[in-house]
Image (cartoon, grey):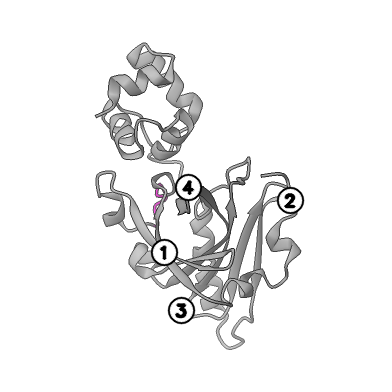
């Protein structure tokens, strides 16, 4: 995608527009590499590589996914996270957005005699809590990175509830430094099986939650292989 102005910054009504107009729904897969953080419910992480399916709302080119308490561990169960994005056809951002809620995915849609590649870019979210009217909004774009804003009144009689709720909300974005994902032959083989033998090294690294460099170094050290296609041929199941 050629560099364009941030859709969120250029439209003050971006979030409201995502809830207006004719609605269609479809199921999409949430990327496994975006399920590394501690706030996801454990049962979602213990499905042995099975993808997580979520419902996506589409109104025109505007996209919205709602994540609620059935997706989060106990500490975050009272939060609702709405993830917003746009649909483009045959045009993808060159840079991937950061986690935990932003990503790009590519469903292929049949249109007449050929398939169109629809790129779904998710780059904004609104976080609310059932016991406060305050909101935390986060969005990202290559031109400015991630921007955070908070809005809404503090309850004058007891503001501590609002403050404590959004201390926890910011924990969604805290980088987990313990338990860094490890590369093993079994995990690498499963990732190739999940994404398919045509997946490239970058896609597999994301699936494992590691860097390209770490994956390349591991394959060289443990398999004696520098060529990615050789790695796939050896490990595909």
CB atoms of marks 1 and 2 within 8 Å: no
**Residue 221, located in which quarter of the rendered image?**
top left
Q: Tag 2: Cα neighbours inside 10 Å, few (<14), some, or many (≥20)?
A: few
**Is 139 left or right of 25, judged from the image as shown?**
right
Q: Quarter of the image containing the C terminus? A: top left
Q: Mark 1 points at which residue?
A: 26
Q: Mark 4 points at which residue?
A: 115
Q: In this view, does 147 lie above or below 57?
A: above
Magenta range is 35-39
Describe the element under mark 3 as helix, strand or loop.
Answer: loop
Q: In this view, does 230 lie above or below 93?
A: above
Residue 200, percent from left and from top = 45, 30
Closer to the observer: label 1 or label 3?
A: 1
Mark seen at residue 130: 3
Describe the element under mark 1 as helix, strand or loop.
Answer: strand
Closer to the observer: label 2 or label 4?
A: 4
**Is 100 left or right of 139, judged from the image as shown?**
left
As measured in the structure, the alpha-carbon distance from the residue carrying label 1 to the one carrying label 4 is 17 Å
Which mark sits nearer the N-terminus, 3 or 2? 2
Q: Nearer the viewer, residue 34 or 27?
A: 27
Q: Name the residue under label 2.
A: 4
């Amino acid at each position: 995608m050629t560099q364009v102005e941030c859709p969120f910054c250029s439209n003050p009504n971006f979030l409201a527009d995502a809830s207006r107009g004719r609605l269609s729904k479809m199921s999409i897969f949430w990327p496994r590499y975006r399920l590394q953080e501690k706030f996801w419910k454990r049962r979602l992480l213990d499905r042995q590589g099975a993808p997580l399916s979520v419902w996506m709302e589409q109104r025109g080119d505007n996209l919205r996914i709602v994540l609620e308490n059935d997706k989060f561990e106990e500490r975050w169960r009272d939060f609702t996270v709405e993830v917003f994005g746009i649909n483009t056809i045959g045009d993808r951002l060159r840079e991937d957005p950061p986690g935990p809620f932003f990503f790009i995915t590519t469903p292929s849609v049949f249109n007449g005699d050929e398939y169109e590649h629809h790129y779904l870019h998710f780059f904004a979210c609104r976080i609310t809590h059932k016991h406060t009217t305050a909101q935390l909004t986060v969005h990202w774009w290559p031109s400015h990175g991630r921007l955070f804003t908070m809005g809404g009144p503090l309850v004058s009689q007891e503001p501590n509830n609002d403050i404590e709720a959004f201390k926890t909300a910011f924990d969604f974005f805290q980088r987990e430094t313990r338990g860094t994902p490890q590369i093993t032959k079994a995990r690498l083989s499963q990732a190739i099986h999940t994404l398919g033998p045509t997946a490239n090294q970058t896609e597999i690294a994301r699936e494992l939650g590691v860097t390209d460099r770490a994956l390349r170094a591991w394959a060289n050290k443990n398999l004696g292989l520098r060529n990615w296609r050789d790695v796939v041929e050896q490990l595909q199941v």
